[in-house]
Image: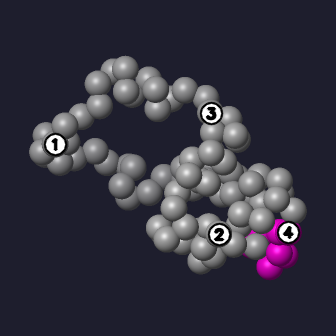
Amino acid sequence: MKADGVLIEDYNSLIDHFVTLCRNFLREPTLTSEDIQDEIISIGPCLDISQQLTLMKPFYKLEIKTVIFSIPAHKSPSPFWLSLNTMRC
């Protein structure tokens, strides 16, 4: 469902909407993304440069779809509190 309350029924529109939500979420600064605390970083392992570069590579809608639909239906609900089985029509 869009923010204006309009139900998204078309599968491709639903995927587009989900991707847009994710992109917007990742762009907005949050308390966790503003300040890096060195003492927290030193507690655990860090990504090496190769892993960091992999995270910056472009991705495709099909990759997102593949990952989303590989999540078992009994795992976390979608952002709209629907099970993943509901979206697999």
Specify the quadrant of the image occupied by residue 15: bottom right
Q: Residues within 10 Å of mark 3 (few under 14, many from 20)?
A: few
Q: Cα distance, mark 1 to mark 4? A: 43 Å
Element type where label 1 sits in the image: loop
Q: Residue at x 37, y 27 (%)?
A: 51
Q: Which residue is mark 2?
A: 85
Q: Image check: 62 left or right of 78?
A: right
- Amino acid carrying label 1: it is Gly
Q: In the image, which is nearer the foreground, mark 1 or mark 4?
A: 4
Q: Which residue is mark 3?
A: 59
Q: Nearer the viewer, residue 18 or 26?
A: 18
- Mark 1 vs 2, N-terminal side: 1
- Mark 4 vs 2, N-terminal side: 4
- Amino acid carrying label 4: it is Glu
Q: Image check: 2 left or right of 81?
A: right
Q: Image check: 85 left or right of 30?
A: right
Q: Which residue is mark 4?
A: 9
Give the quarter of the figure containing the C terminus: bottom right
Q: Residues within 10 Å of mark 4 (few under 14, many from 20)?
A: few
Q: In this orientation, does residue 33 appear?
A: yes
- Amino acid carrying label 3: it is Phe
Residue range (magenta) = 2-9
x then y, percent, for residue 85: 65, 69
**Pointers 2 and 3 in contact (CB under 8 A)?**
no
Instruction: Give yes or no for residue 57 being in the magenta stretch.
Output: no
Q: Residues within 10 Å of mark 1 (few under 14, many from 20)?
A: few
Q: In the image, which is nearer the foreground, mark 1 or mark 2?
A: 2
- Mark 1 vs 3, N-terminal side: 1
